[in-house]
Image (tube, coloured by chain):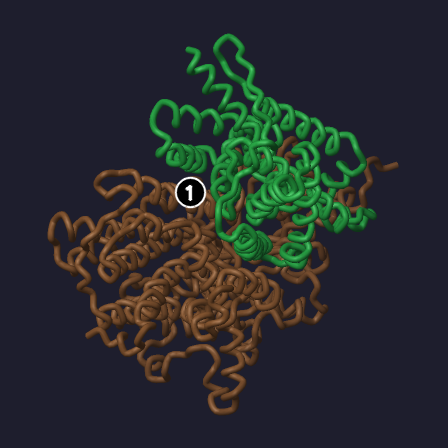
Amino acid sequence: MNFLDAFGAHNFLIRDAIITLLVGFSVFAVLNAGMFAMPQIGFMALGAYTAAILNTDHGMPLTVTLGAAALAGGMSGLLLGGLLRRLDGIYLAIGTIGFAEIVRLVARNLDITGGPSGVLGVDRSLNDLQLCVLAATALAALARISRTHIGRAIATMREDPLMAMHQGINLQRYRIALFTLSGTLSGLAGGVYVHIAGYAHPNDYTFGKLVTVVAAVILGGATSVIGPIVGTVITVGVPEMLRSLNEYRSLLNGSLIVLIIAFAPSGIAPVVGTAWRRAIVGVRRSSRGHRSPTPDQLDQHPAPVTMSQPRAPAADVVLSVQGISKSFGGVRALADVSLVVESHDVLGVIGPNGSGKTTLLNVLSGIYSPETGDLRLDGKSVAPMLGHPELLARAGIARTFQTIRIVGAASVYDNVAIGAHLLHTASVASAIISSPSSRRDRAAVHCAVESALERVGLTSLATTPAGSLAYGLQRKVEIARAMVRQPKVLLLDEPTAGMAPNERDEVFALVSELSRNDIAVIVVEHDVESISANCNRIMVLNFGRIIASGAADDVLREEGVIDAYLGRSTRG
Amino acid sequence: MDFFLQQTINGIAIGSVYVLFALGFSLVIASLRVFHVAHAAVFTWGAIFNWHLVEGRGWPLAVSLAVAALLTGALNVLCYLALIRHLEDRPNKEFAAFISSLGGMIVLTELASRDLDRSTVGLPARAVPRQVWDIGGVRISIVQLMMLVVAALAFALLHWLIQTTRFGRQIQAVAYDRETARMLGVNVLGVNALVFFLSGALAGVSAVLVSVSFNVVSGSLGDSYLVIVIAVMVVGGFGHVAGNFAGGFIVGLVSVYTSAYITSAYREVVIYSLLLLFLVVRPTGLFRTSPLQVKA
């Protein structure tokens, strides 16, 4: 079964490379989500020592030790992910590197782990077939995940965590889950390693080792599962093939990292991928767009999200805000703001710059938690959700942003599909095995996305990268993303800024249509004319206070409003 | 009691070197929001430069220390130009700069190991001052005194530079908002290069002090101090000068006490645990700075 012996003197190198690849997948699992975490060598050491001790001291067979190694890695991933859940960026990198070093140093000093000489005499019973099957399974699982809505959510949290939260993606839960996955993979790699090498030794789990693996993942590209494979092949293979280079392996690796970050920041795999696609262009060009369900799937499951017929206008209070205040340092951005929105309302919020308009939306969507005040949706208080965009999104609030937040490299279709994250109701496991219920979800999401695209008039651009669109069109992508999950309340932050007048009219026509379809809309705008023409109610903010509110025409005639806009302090 | 006092003095002395190393690190983090790990390799090179000057050319320590500091300063400017500068406008700058710096660290560390033929060397006996004072049973060596004095001088210099000079105001302006500073006529490239120079020089000085104190120079010198100095910054608060001082002395004392009262094998475990504890319980450090938080 040790068919890798066919590679002669290279057999150990290749087995080593496959194990490095397993750890590389584990690094990929977190880096791909934009998490700057590097605990993998620590997980690997835990897995290695668990397997080694179970095998030598307790005579456990291979299957048990490998399972225990994966479990040890996974559990420590869960624990560490939970402990470090508040950390971000560099802090996370530092904390996790610290964890890995602690594991190594403790292993080097404990009796049970054999101190500095490690655990010897592990049976070398893992054959090449098992090794390859394990690596292929890990690859298949990661590739599968990246093709589900979970993969889309992970890519979104990498590109824009704040926006991801607003689509109902629970970042903390995802982070902890990915830590656990990363731990499982590395723990397994550690178990595999001891059953090939025959020992567990503390010097195998150093920071230097981690740097090699991270280098491979970065080289290959941390945004696709092919990346770690390409990277490992290059970092292990190239110096080996060019014997004269072997001595310079570290120098080569280091320089390659610097060059890759400078010139091809997403790694080599995407560059190779693009060249490959270019080579076979024409053959499969048309089928390279978004993944649509087959026609019969669509027939079986008619779109559950319909927004066509206007319903009878029964006005219910959808959202009510009571006494919300928010300060930044000494600045009172919102002072005792209260408002009510009914189901068919389009509430326009206007006010001079710095009057608190965007702060209001940020409180309503969960970015800020206010010092005081209550928020009710459909009569129920959601005050505990304030400050948590993912919970408010689930409760039925959707928004667009003043500065556009889309994933530029992804297609228009995919950008809108991000907004439909919450329409996936099937469990994670069923999404991965593509169960009937998850296929139903996907068909439903597909219909919802298509219908949202049609309503903003972007159907023909569905496969275009969103970042390449004109400004006004990008805003429409955001609006489509916000409305695709049929929220109760839609918050629009200057949706027509930078648009031509005819586009502006289109957007407001869409807004009126949405409000007839039971989506209450709150729109922040500078353009008083559009607001007065398209909103049935207007609220004017100045210095964080409501200075006028009511029917559009009445409000705009009020003296206080004219004062605020013209900047008069006294009238003479 | 004497033993305790002796350990405390040792802790403060080594702590002041940690402070120097951390100050250079922090200066870059605070002004550029960049975690420049290659700083550790620049540190290694400080010890190597000094070793070459003392061993090869027979220079006195006081001169070689100054020259080594200038050389590491220049080396760090090179690092900035080759590793960091082109990444400053990237949306994921923090990550890109860290990885790029990691690549630079691999190269510089490897070059350092090659320069020393992968061996560990020590300074010649004649070059290391051996004077030791005995004050009431507590011994203070001239090297320890040097550590304290140099750390104090460096702190005073840095404080003076940043708080009172035009250059200091420029650093603060660039740290606050690079684009606005540029529009107001600040030479951002020049300011950043100077920040890296100062930071590298501090690394050089601390490396020379460490290599004189323990009489060890090797290619992995910087690596072994990297996590310690990270702990110093996390405990004290990233990019916070006074915090670095507190953090440096705390970590210095903790490491010396652990070696003295428990076992030196667990010295690092205790330091890393302190680091993790702070990250979990108080990630902003003692002095509540959070320059690296992602803005919403």
Q: Is residue B34 left or right of residue B234?
A: right
User: Given the image, on which type of amino acid does mark 1 rest?
Assistant: Gly
**Residue A325 falls in image quadrant:** top right
Residue A191 in the image: x percent, y percent? 25, 57
Q: Looking at the picture, does residue B36 appear above or below residue A245?
A: above
Residue nearer the viewer, B174 or B122: B122
Chain A, hue in figure: brown
Q: Name the residue located 42 percent from the left edge and 15 percent from the top edge.
A: B3
Q: Secondary structure at mark 1?
A: helix
Q: Name the residue located 70 percent from the left edge and 40 percent from the top edge.
A: B67
Q: Name the residue located 57 percent from the left edge and 68 percent from the top edge.
A: A264
Residue B179 in the image: x percent, y percent? 74, 51
Residue A271 in the image: x percent, y percent? 53, 75
Chain B, hue in figure: green
Q: Identify the residue position indicated by label 1 in the image.
A: A98
Q: Looking at the picture, does residue B116 appear above or below residue A512?
A: above
Label 1 crowd (10 A; few <14 / some 14-19 / many >=20)? many
Chain holding disc 1: A
Kindly tell me whether residue B139 is visible in this rendering: yes
**Residue situated furthest right in the rendering:** A572
Q: Quadrant of the N terminus of chain A?
A: bottom left
Q: Name the residue located 66 percent from the left edge and 36 percent from the top edge.
A: B65
Residue A166 in the image: x percent, y percent? 49, 54
